[in-house]
Image (spheres, helix red, strand yellow):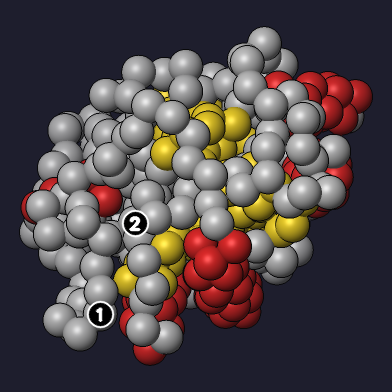
Amino acid sequence: MVMGSTLSRSIVRQFHSHPCRQSPRHSAIKSPPSPWGTFQRIVPSSLQSIDVRAFPRRPVPSTIPKPPYAAQGLSSEWASTVPYHTPQDITKARAAGQLARDILRQAQALCHEGVTTDEIDQVLHEAILANGAYPSPLNYMGFPKSVCTSVNNIIAHGIPDKRPLLNGDMINVDVTVFLDGYHGDTSATFLVGDVDQQGRDLVACTKETLDKAISICGPKVPLSEIGRVITDLATKNGYSVSEELSGHGIGREFHCLPLIYHHLNDEEGLMAPGMIFTIEPILCQGLSMGVMWPDEWTISTVDGGRSAQFEHTVVITDDGVDVLTA
């Protein structure tokens, strides 16, 4: 799950109107032919402010261990330094990452025409609980659901709702689980039915940028190299890279240092053994600038172009990198 970077943290919450509203929070509009292909643009159903903290939550049994923020809807405890993880820590982080991977695979199987994102959330919520874990997004800073689902022109932090998926949609499902004291975080963009070639190309390039970024990781590599290789490949293919959202450290905390910027940057810091962080590039067809919805979670592209995202959690080892969510 991405973190806000250049947008104010008070505006871009780390994750996703009315309490009684039964209809979808957003609607789709038919627009003139788009330079970015054939798809349905998603827009908010109203510009009225929405308090998602008042939304009902799916129940979690008392037997499931919960992260500290869960009860009151708080955020992570941010330390001023990057945590370094022991082999025992990494074993637990790997278990959480492997569960997140398995849940994401279940999500892929659900992404079909006619299925609502709320139905996806319900199935994944129950699957996470069945494995003795807690869905990390649930009540994180008040986020009302257990996963994020971002469709077409939604950049990140989409809140699952009653809109059924349509043939030609692209949907990113972002899964984070809290298992045995550690978080594991991963996401992917899936194709629903017959997605046009422009959409397929965007998804393929985004996946390639993640793979290439992971491949250059290792001890003493500048963290800024991640942004360089992602931007080089994205620009070569005609896409922009979101500068408003970043990857992040993860482990006992859902979010912690280091922040991982996917765009060109001159941030200081070198990778070192024991670091665990997410890499989660977001590529856009048009402008990468985001617009915050009235729910104060959902972020859409400013120009209506589509975006795609892929994410893995990685750990830096003595001689390279290991993907904990692969």
Asked which quadrant contains residue 229, the reply is top right
Between 77 and 50, the one nearer to me in the picture: 77
Q: Is residue 62 visible?
A: yes
Between 128 and 88, the one nearer to me in the picture: 88
Q: Residue furthest top?
A: 266
Give the residue type at disc 1. Ile
Structural crowding at the residue carrying mark 2, measured as other residues with C-alpha within 10 Å and reported as few (<14), some (14–19) or many (≥20): many
Q: CA distance from mark 2 to mark 1?
A: 15 Å
In the rendering, at what x and y percent does residue 218 appear?
Answer: 79, 41
Does residue 322 appear left or right of residue 281 in this picture?
Answer: right
Q: Is residue 304 visible?
A: no
Does residue 85 appear left or right of residue 179 in this picture?
Answer: right
Rendered-image quadrant of the C terminus: bottom right
First in sequence: mark 2 vs mark 1: 1
The residue labelled by disc 2 is 137
Does residue 241 appear left or right of residue 208 in this picture?
Answer: left
In the rendering, at what x and y percent does residue 189 appear?
Answer: 65, 55
The residue labelled by disc 1 is 64
In the rendering, at what x and y percent does residue 136 appear?
Answer: 35, 60
Q: Which mark is residue 210?
A: none
* Residue at 20 percent of width and 52 percent of height: 69
Indicate the secondary structure of the residue bearing disc 1.
loop
Structural crowding at the residue carrying mark 1, measured as other residues with C-alpha within 10 Å and reported as few (<14), some (14–19) or many (≥20): some
* Residue at 71 percent of width and 58 percent of height: 323
Q: Residue furthest bottom?
A: 130
Give the residue type at disc 2. Pro
Between 187 and 270, the one nearer to me in the picture: 270
Asked which quadrant contains residue 19, the reply is bottom left
Between 7 and 97, the one nearer to me in the picture: 97
